[in-house]
Image (cartoon, rainbow, N blue to C red):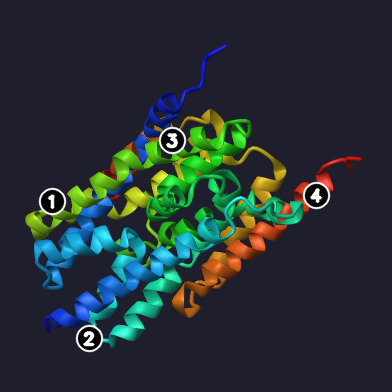
Amino acid sequence: MTDIPTLKLWIVIFGLGAGSYFLRFVFLGLIGDRELPEWVLRHLRYTAVAVLPGLVAPAILFPAATSGSPDPARLGAAFVTAALGYITRNVILAIVGGAATLYALLYIFG
Amino acid sequence: MQTVTDRSQFIKGMKQGAPFILVIVPFGLLFGVVATEAGLNVFEALAFSVVVIAGAAQFTALQLLSDNLPAAIALVSALAVNLRMAMYSASITPHLGHMPLWKRAFAAYLLVDQTYATSVLEFEKNPDRTPSQKFAFFVGTASAVVPLWYASTIAGALLGSSIPDGLALDFAVPITFLAIIAPALRTLAHIAAAFTSIVLALAFMSLPYNLGLLIAAITAMAVGAEVERRMTPKAA
């Protein structure tokens, strides 16, 4: 294994830090308290439900831990988590139920 | 009626952000382990987590650096993974945009998946909160996860590869996000947006630089907004 050169590593750490900070600051810092039009606000209300499901869907169907092949334990755990969360509206219950399902299924399927 | 103080909002934020401890700790441990395996020392691994404070982007950058790719490629790819932060920034601005600049600058540093998801869902449920109460809540959501992100990175770097794979730590992230998002599917518009996001993210998975997620997210936002517009009776 080749080690990462120290200077290169620090360039990436600070470059990525500055770039990520810029992305986080860009609207919050520059728009501030100016009013946004209603249609923009209507879109922004759906940001969370538009980003997070797409962010985790590939990791659920094709987990890196199983080299990308679908895994019954992880699929089952994801299903139980989503169903519990939707029905009970209780985040902690959904997490605990999902984790319990994951470990039970991992144990069964070995 | 209960009085709403900034202090009580901070504590409320802390409590509602607490489930994410279950994500942050395994994810941070995992990053520390992977960083050590890539040849970083504890200080370098910690610096990564403090300066960048974005798990998925850190993993991307580290992976590409370990593959001996140029720094510019590692930077651009990891920043693409973080483009969603700009959407978070836009989405949280109507709530936190009234704060003084230094507070907005501070909030921007703390704007990560977990603090964003917890806060924006709470603000939508309680739109009448003052900007200062919202800011207190937001900082509350960060108060546990951010220090624990640093601490678990250090712990992972120190423990190295002695953490067994059987713990399936990789799956802490999907489970916790599902648990947060499922209760937030309150209307048909939310469900339509989430469904669009999943289908398109999977369809465009093979696109480079995480572009698939951006396409999926932007389309899903438009779908959610359009469904809401059609379902809402015309106001005068």
**Kind of residue at disc 3:** Ala
Residue at screen point 87% across, 40% down: B233
In the rendered view, tell whether residue A80 sits above or below residue A21: above
Could you tell me if residue A4 is visible in this image? no
Residue B15 location (% of width, % of height): 38, 30
Q: Which residue is mark 1?
A: B155
Q: CA distance from mark 1 to mark 3?
A: 29 Å
Chain under label 3?
B
**Is the Cβ of the residue at disc 1 closer than 8 Å to that at disc 3?**
no
Give residue B188's quadrant in the image: top right
Front: mark 1 or 3: 3
Residue at screen point 52% across, 54% down: A53
Residue B236 location (% of width, % of height): 92, 40
Q: Nearer the viewer, residue A72 or B38?
A: B38
Chain under label 1?
B
Q: Which residue is mark 4?
A: B229
Residue at screen point 44% across, 34% down: A91
Front: mark 3 or 2: 3
Residue B68 circle label = 2
